[in-house]
Amino acid sequence: MKTRIGEITFAVPQVREGGFYPSALEKGLQSERALTITLAEMYIQGVSTRRVKAITEQLCGIEISATQVSRATAQLAEILQEWRERPLGEIVYLYLDARYEKVRVAGQVRDVAVLVATGFTPEGERQILGVSVALSEHEVHWRAFLKALKDRGLHGMELKISDDHVGLGAARRAVFGSVAWQRCQFHLQQNAGAYLPKQSMRLEVAAEIRSIFNATNKTRAEEMLKEAFEK
């Protein structure tokens, strides 16, 4: 077993029936798995293999080769793949969004879209349903992402929420056309700010839009909207 003070060799006694394994050593294996995951996470976060090796030597007193780091990363990729392919169940509210991150593709750094689906169960539990990296938010990428969610068993939706992106809109209508759609309030506030003559007005207008959304009923919301236009 590898520890902070070095490598320790244990002689595990054998019994006639077999199957015996000391619980203390099992805890050591759990620590080893935790170390493996940590190695992979450091590498994914951009820490070089040379730096990973230096850190493990300092903290654990053991040498980690580049091959071992790559192997640890592959194990983490397997865990992620299992999570991405896990069966889904009943989801009442589905939130769809994307963010852009810089990644290295074919030796070049470029922006890619990270598609994210978040859902709420009938019990109110929030779950990350899926994450997918795509070259853009074009309809073909959103449609493949949504179809994968459906194939994994996603059902029972009463409402889907997203921004008004053209590609996403076409994809959600194609895959979940019978489910009602609501435009994301946050993105609506951001889009409204682009039409203001002065940037200094954005915070005030955003706060006013939020208050309209939080109105006690539809009638009051319409009254507040009219008042806002008359200002």
Image: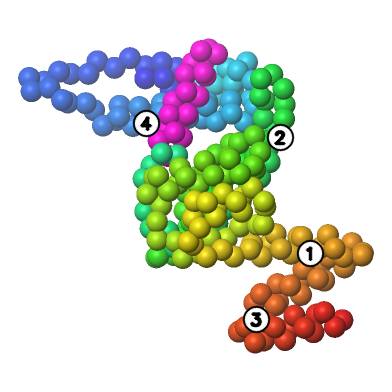
The reply to whether dot 2 and dot 4 touch (C-beta < 8 Å) is no
Out of 162 and 173, give the one closest to the viewer. Answer: 173
Per the rendered image, the range of residues in magenta is 63-83
Q: Earlier in the sequence, mark 2 or mark 4?
A: 4
Name the spot of residue 19 as percent of width and height, x first.
Answer: 15, 25
Whichever of callouts 3 and 2 sits on the residue coming sooner in the sequence is 2
Identify which amino acid the numbered label 4 is placed on. Gln
Task: Characterize the magenta stretch by its predominant secondary structure.
Answer: helix
Which of the 4 image quadrants contains residue 41?
top right
Depth check, front residue: 43 or 58: 43
Q: Residue at x 43, y 22 (%)?
A: 3
Residue under label 4: 30
Estimate how packed mark 1 is, as few (under 14), some (14 to 19) or many (20 or more) residues with alpha carbons within 10 Å: few
Mark 3 is on which residue type? Ala
Q: Which residue is mark 3?
A: 215
- Count of numbered marks: 4
Nearest the eye: 107 or 144: 144
204 w.r.t. 218: above or below: above
Whole-percent x, y for residue 96 in the image: 57, 53
